[in-house]
Amino acid sequence: MAKKRAKIRLFVEGTLGEGQGIVASKEQANYLFNVMRLKIGDNVLLFNGRDGEWQAEVVEAGKRAGKLACRSQTAPLQLPPDLWLLFAPIKKSRTAFIVEKATELGAARIMPVLTDFTNMDKIQIDRLRAYALEATEQCGGTFIPEVCDIQKLSDVLDDWPEDRHIMFCDESREALPVAQALAAETKGKWAIVIGPEGGFSPAEAERLRGMKQVTCVTLGPRILRADTAAVAALTAWQSALGDWE
Ligand code: SAH
C-alpha cells in the first residue's frame, strides 16, 4: 500500500482566498519541488496568519519557482486569547524555547523586556520571529503571535493599559498559588510577567506589586528556570482563563 504522505503546511505572505494564486518563493519552490518532490496536482496546506488555512494545488512546479492555487478553506483564522507574555531574554536557545512554547500554548503577543538583572541584551529578533512562524506551521495554528522588539520593562509599565491584567510570577514571597489566584479572576485582556535568571530587582518587584492590574502568583515551592516558569505560567493561565474549554 502506498504510504500516505503527511500534509505539508506552509506559511506564505500573500492573500489566501477562493481561486487565489500564490507564487512560491525560491526557497519554497526548492522545498516543495526538490526536497518534497511535489508534482503538479499535489496538494499542500497554506496559511498566512490572517486568512485561516487553505488547501492549495500545485499548478506550476519548477526548480526555482512555482505556483499554487487555493482550492478550499480547511480552517478559519483562530485567534488565541488576548494574552501577552513578557519575559527577560535569557540564553539564546532558551529564549527560542520560550518563543516556541508561547506560540504553541497560545499567546497573542510575545514581548522580550530588559529588566534590571537581565543578563542578555542582544537578541536576534528576526530569529525569534522565525521561531514563532515555525511553531505555528508545526502546531497547526493559523495565527502567528507578534514578537515585539525588545523594550525596557520600566518603559512598558509606564504605558501599561488600564484594562490589561497582569499575572506576575513572583517566586520571592507569599503570593497566592496560581490556580487559587486565577479562580478569582475573569477572562479578558491579560499579560504574564516572568523575570530573568537573577529574578526581578527589589524595585521592579515593588513596582509590579503596587500596580492595581497585578495579581501575584506562585508556581509552586521550587524556583523554576525562566523558560520552565514561562511554560508553567502559560499552562496555568490557559487552563483557568484561556481557550482550553
Ligand atoms: N530570583 C531567583 C531566580 C528567578 S527564576 C533566584 O535566582 O533565586 C526566573 C523567573 O521565573 C522569576 O523571576 C519568576 O518570574 C519565575 N519563577 C520561577 N520560579 C517561580 C515560582 N516558583 N513561582 C513564581 N514564579 C517563579
Image: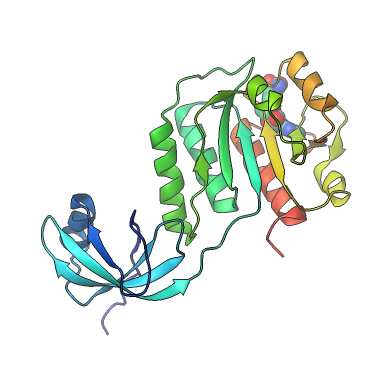
Q: Looking at the image, which residue sits at the far left?
A: 63
Comparing 42 with 152, the one in front is 152
Residue 81 location (% of width, % of height): 65, 54
Residue 158 location (% of width, % of height): 70, 23
Q: Is residue 46 left or right of residue 49?
A: left
Question: Is the residue 102 above or below the residue 119 in the image?
Answer: below
Q: Is residue 222 visible?
A: no
Residue at 11% in and 62% down = 62
Residue at 49% in and 26% down = 91
Residue at 76% in and 38% down = 167
Residue at 77% in and 41% down = 163
Q: Is residue 217 left or right of residue 30?
A: right
Residue 64 location (% of width, % of height): 12, 55
Quadrant containing the N terminus in the rendered view: bottom left
Comparing 5 with 51, the one in front is 51
Question: Is the residue 17 above or below the residue 166 in the image?
Answer: below
Quadrant containing the C terminus in the rendered view: bottom right
Question: Is the residue 68 above or below the residue 165 in the image?
Answer: below
Quarter of the view holding residue 80: bottom right
